[in-house]
Image (cartoon, rainbow, N blue to C red):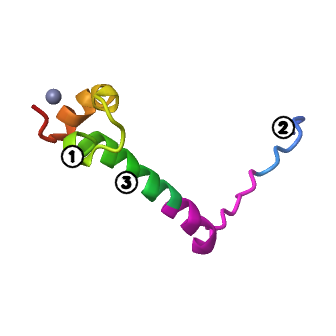
Amino acid sequence: MAQSTAAPTPTPTTQTLTPLPLRSIAPWAVFFGVLMLVLLYFVGAEQGATALVSGEGVHEWVHDARHLLGFPCH
Ligand SMILES: [Zn+2]
């Protein structure tokens, strides 16, 4: 009769993941949503009459993203 000399391996414990409550996620979701809207503004509308920053600096920095997203440019 063979006997195993190895120590019994512990069974892996299942970690229960508790979902994050919506109340803790909501402020971050709003923050990043506003941040994305500001970024979208600078990519899509920061030019000419709607420009917040004078000059072509911002436009040149986001020029490729503007074309990538299909905003009219020139
Ligand atoms: Zn362009």
Image quadrant in which the N terminus is located: top right
The span shown in magenta is: 12-30
Q: Is mark 3 within 8 Å of ligand 1?
A: no
| Neighbourhood count class around disc 3 (C-alpha, 10 Å): few under 14, some 14–19, many 20 upward | few
Residue 49's tag is 1
| Neighbourhood count class around disc 2 (C-alpha, 10 Å): few under 14, some 14–19, many 20 upward | few
Determine which residue is flagged by label 2.
Answer: 2
From the image, state whether disc 2 or disc 1 is nearer to you: 1
How far from the left and from the top, in percent, is residue 53?
36, 38
From the image, state whether disc 3 or disc 1 is nearer to you: 1
Observer-nearest residue: 3 or 61? 61
Could you give the CA–CA distance between mark 3 and mark 1, rounded to whole angstroms?
19 Å
Q: On the rendered structure, is 13 left or right of 59? A: right
Could you give the CA–CA distance between mark 2 and mark 1, rounded to whole angstroms?
86 Å
What residue lies at 29% left-to-right and 43% top-to-bottom?
51
Determine which residue is flagged by label 3.
Answer: 37
Image quadrant in which the C terminus is located: top left
Quadrant location of ligand 1?
A: top left
How far from the left and from the top, in percent, is residue 59?
28, 31
Q: Amino acid at mark 3?
A: Leu
Observer-nearest residue: 27 or 42? 42
How far from the left and from the top, in percent, is residue 48?
20, 40
Could you give the CA–CA distance between mark 3 and mark 2, rounded to whole angstroms?
69 Å
Q: Amino acid at mark 1?
A: Ala
Answer above or below: position of 46 versus 30.
above
Q: Is mark 1 within 8 Å of ligand 1?
A: no
Q: Amino acid at mark 2?
A: Ala
Q: Are discs 2 and 1 less than 8 Å apart at CB?
A: no
